[in-house]
Image (tube, rainbow, N blue to C red):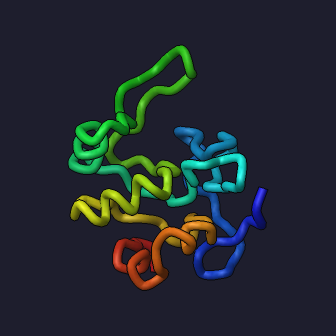
Amino acid sequence: MDESLNVLGEALEPCSLKPLTGFHRDGFCNTGAHNPAVHAVCIYATEAFLAYSKKVGNDLSTPMPQYDFAGVKPGQSWCLGGHSFVKAHLDGHAPQIFIHSTHIKMLELIDLDTLKQYAIDL
């Protein structure tokens, strides 16, 4: 696992413990070479973003009990795949993010100034 720093170079803060998020389901958006989707950006889910995400094939809102996944609901935080965030940004549908909970690895996909535009915790 990569060092647990956020995009600001500080200690990575938890994204969500309920629902339990993260590639490792530890509440943090930790990532590394074992996580090709780079689940590194902590988003604030809205109804509009969840609908967009489902429309483009990344259904985060439908429960999948077989994976102990209740589905993400509006108002919850979630570690989104970095590539999905970049696509949403390019499509004009990027959600707001918690920058202190967004892993430094996101800087390999998108610049800090762009991330700051979506930050709700600065």
Res 115 → quadrant: bottom left
Instruction: Say which residue appears at 35% left-offset and 34% top-offset.
Output: 59
Q: Is residue 60 above or below residue 63?
A: below
Q: Write down the quadrant of residue 21 in the picture.
A: top right
For this orientation, the residue located farthest to the top is 66
Residue drawn at (36%, 72%) of the image: 118
> Looking at the figure, which quarter contains the N terminus?
bottom right
Is residue 70 toward the left or the right of residue 73 in the image? right
Q: Position of residue 45 (x, y in %)?
A: 35, 50
How many marks on residues?
Answer: 0
Looking at the image, residue 5 sits to the left or right of residue 29; the answer is right
Up-down: is 29 above or below 20? below
Of 53 and 33, nearer the camera is 33
- Residue 34 image offset from top left, x and y in percent: 71, 47
Give x and y (percent) for residue 47.
24, 45
Q: Where in the figure is residue 17, as x and y percent of width and height?
A: 60, 45
Image position of 89 with respect to 18: above or below? below
Between 70 and 92, which is closer to the camera in this rendering?
92
